[in-house]
Amino acid sequence: MNKSIYESIKEAAVDGKLPDDYSLPDLTDGEGDVSFADGALDGITMYHMPPFEMTKSDYQVMTEAINAASNHEFEIADPLFIQLSKKNRAISVSGKLQQYIIDNHGNLKAGNLYEYVVGLIQLSDNKECVKYGLLILGLLVFNNEEVKDVIRTLALSDEFTLFCVHIMYQWSGGNNDIFETARKVHGWGRIHALELLRPLMPRTKEIREWMLKEGINNKIAPFYSALTCWRNANIGSILYVNPTYEDLHYIGKILDAMLDESAVPGISTLDKRTDILLTYLEKAQKHALCAEDYQVIYHICQYGETVNAAEVSQFAKDMLHSDRAKSVLPDVTRRLEARKFKKP
């Protein structure tokens, strides 16, 4: 019998988190020689794929699996969930699976379902089956610290963070668990955890500061979390009050990430985006900026040209043509010699 996924993660964890080079075994998922980073397929499905249509036969398999678990017929439920996993990723059928349980809760035995899925998430070597278990567990009320520790452990893998933080969100004090998870994962897991993380007492200041400085730092792309960090950490209030240079440096990185809307909505969703960019430039010009800051200003210049925000693009051009900018980042100055960004 293969080692369970839970045991693999638990044994690999060092000081409460997984090594940077850790990945779950067998990531090919039947895709030939192509392999995906942990959590990548689910992330792609969530952000870039159209809704998945489940077949009637697969839906029947799913309901039979749930009913078997409810009836304590675990030996029947196991192969049914495995069969379901061959063509149905948990992320794609999560809505139908949970809705079936909600609609039929009066006929289902919660105690048996709980017993089954607690065993499933600890013993299964099938990634999708573990996720099915987490989806069902997310509908059940429990307060068992040992089970919570299992979920905290599974959450260390980017493959399961999404499913685990949704369970944590329902716990008393679960926001703290989500925060700790977000700091320990660095791929798709961090992106998913940030969607549910809120700067709540007693760690409001700490969480907001972490969102400002670290929230968009992940192995995938910063733009996935930029708007979330801006809104949930109320970063606009930092910009408009009295930001330090350090504050502006990180605000600039978040603004830069929001300018990239190639995959997800960003700065275009903000009502006062022109005023926000002008305020950032006004505050930034008072400080000795580094090369990275001027790269942000260069991108703001490009954005202003693209959306016909003349005041924004001209302000940015003036800063980029300054002697200070030329001394810090000559390469940006050379780029400005291109016709589109030449100073009039």
Image (spheres, grey):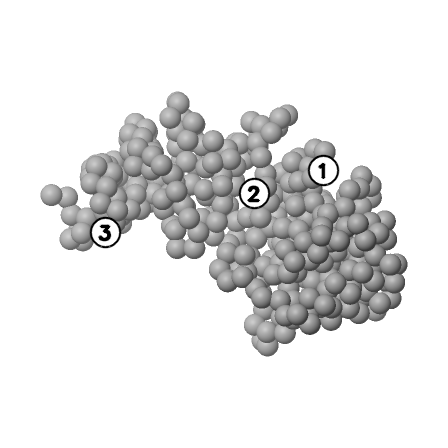
Dot 1: element:
loop
Q: What's the residue type where badge 1 is placed?
A: Trp
Q: Nearer the viewer, mark 1 or mark 3?
A: 1
The answer for how far apart the CA atoms under marks 3 and 2 are is: 36 Å
Residue 46 to residue 192: above or below = below
Mark 2 vs mark 1: in front: 1
Residue in front for this viewpoint, 16 or 301:
301
Q: Rate crowding at label 1 as few (under 14), some (14 to 19) or many (20 or more) other CA atoms within 10 Å.
A: some
Q: Amino acid at mark 2?
A: Leu
Name the quadrant containing residue 5. bottom right
Alpha-carbon distance for marks 2 and 1? Answer: 17 Å
The furthest residue to the bottom: 32
Q: In the displayed image of the protein, which residue is found farthest to the left?
A: 344
Q: Position of residue 194 (x, y in %)?
A: 56, 43
Q: Earlier in the sequence, mark 1 or mark 3?
A: 1
- What number of labels is visible? 3
Kindly identify which residue carries mark 1.
Answer: 171
Quadrant for the C terminus in the image: top left
Q: Please, what secondary structure does the residue beneath circle 2 have?
A: helix
**Is residue 85 visible from the viewing direction of this image?**
no
Q: Which residue is mark 3?
A: 335
Q: At 76% from the left edge and 46% from the top edge, which residue is drawn?
A: 140
Q: Is residue 31 left or right of residue 125?
A: left
